[in-house]
Amino acid sequence: MTRRFSVFFDNSGLLVSGALLALVWANFDHESYEVVSHALHFTVNDIGMAFFFAIAAKEVVEATAPGGALHSPRRSAVPLIAAIGGMVGPAAVYFTLVAVFDRPDLTRGWAIPVATDIAFSYLVARIVFGAKHPGIPFLLLLAIADDALGLLILAVFYPSSDLRLGIFAIVLAVAMAMAWWLRSRKTLNFWPYVLGAGMVSWLAFFWGGLHPALALVPIMPFMPHAARDAGLFVERPNAHDTLNEFEHWWKMPVHVILFFFGLANAGVAVTSVGPGTWFVLAAILLGKPIGILFCTALSVAGGLHMPAGVTWRDITVLAVAASIGFTVALFFATAAFPAGELLDQAKMGALLSFLAAIVAIGVAFLLRVGRMARA
């Protein structure tokens, strides 16, 4: 029972539960759902999700440090280039649909389909290939790079209110100076970084008009970390460096936060399907795989090499698996549109991106790759 709960927990089962509860609730009693959703929105989206993005930033910090998976250009070049294609491709498809169907009111949603949900994409890839296939690190590298670029997009293109960059820069400089001072004093406990520098950084984002959910991202690089990264999303239970202690402590609370994130944001009427839904879904299911495959081909043609043991059929399946947007896409939707019809349409597109999991497994069967080659 404990093992089953752990698998459910580690694969974002609480997020899915919250999203499903929200969908059922919103379709049976929309008025009461809206009251609860509104009450949760600020606490969950602007405060709680800061710790979700902090965990993502932790992986980026470790992966780009000496010995990390992204530190070596030779190892990381192809998935990094593929990640860029996986963001440009869906954005291009989305902009094309907006132009063809003359829907400028949907333009702000262009970043929704660029997102990759690491947890679900990783789960699908493991179902198809198993844990030790060399395509798994390729997907994780791609997804981490996608997340890093996604954080930048969120900060630059989706301010939460009127921008006050002067205030932002001054207060953030104070927060980073605090974090640097803590590190210079060899502070190993993560709480001073969170409650001191982190809170000041949150105020910088909030007062500056940028999304405060990103507040811990510039603080994470100052936390001391292990001399060598154990691997992408490899948890080290016995590691006592500050970054890993942060992850150990916040792992369970972040899953609880994701439950409430799903509950607060996924509740849309099934009748909310509209142009925004199809634009997001088409951009994700078509643009992301095409962009990843195209840029991978470009990098190989330019003299780079794919990971040993990874074939073009494998890359095709991985590219489709990377099209699951879900968590981050849902967050981008709430940042892109105010409450109303367009937001509900975009949310439905983000939720339906989970169809990419079914498509990826189907493509694996057709191409006979991984475990599906023996099925």
Image: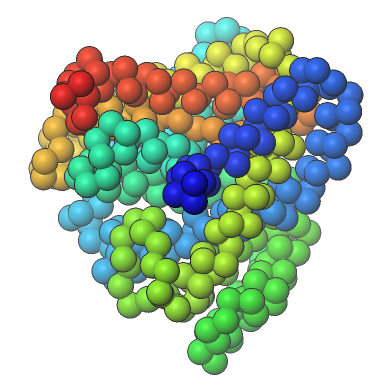
Residue lying at 54% horizontally and 33% vertically, measured from the top left: 326
Q: Is residue 37 visible?
A: yes
Q: Residue at x 28, y 27 (%)?
A: 317
Residue reaching furthest top?
A: 101
Indicate the position of residue 43 as horizontal and vertical percent values.
78, 51
Q: Which of these two is toward me, 76 or 250?
A: 250
Measuring from the top left, give residue 237's x and y in whole percent: 42, 69
Residue 149 showing in the rendered view = no
Residue drawn 66% across the image and 50% down it:
257
In the image, is 130 to the left or to the right of 326? left
339 left or right, relative to 226: right
Of 201 and 264, nearer the camera is 264
Q: Quadrant of the C terminus?
A: top left
Compared to residue 3, the image places residue 374 above or below, namely above
Q: Nearer the viewer, residue 236 or 58?
A: 236
Residue 53 sits in quarter: bottom right
Against 327, is 105 above or below?
A: above
Q: Position of residue 198 (x, y in %)?
A: 66, 69
**In percent of the image, x 85 and y 37: which residue is there?**
36
245 is higher (above) or lower (below) than 344: below
Q: Quadrant of residue 271?
A: top right
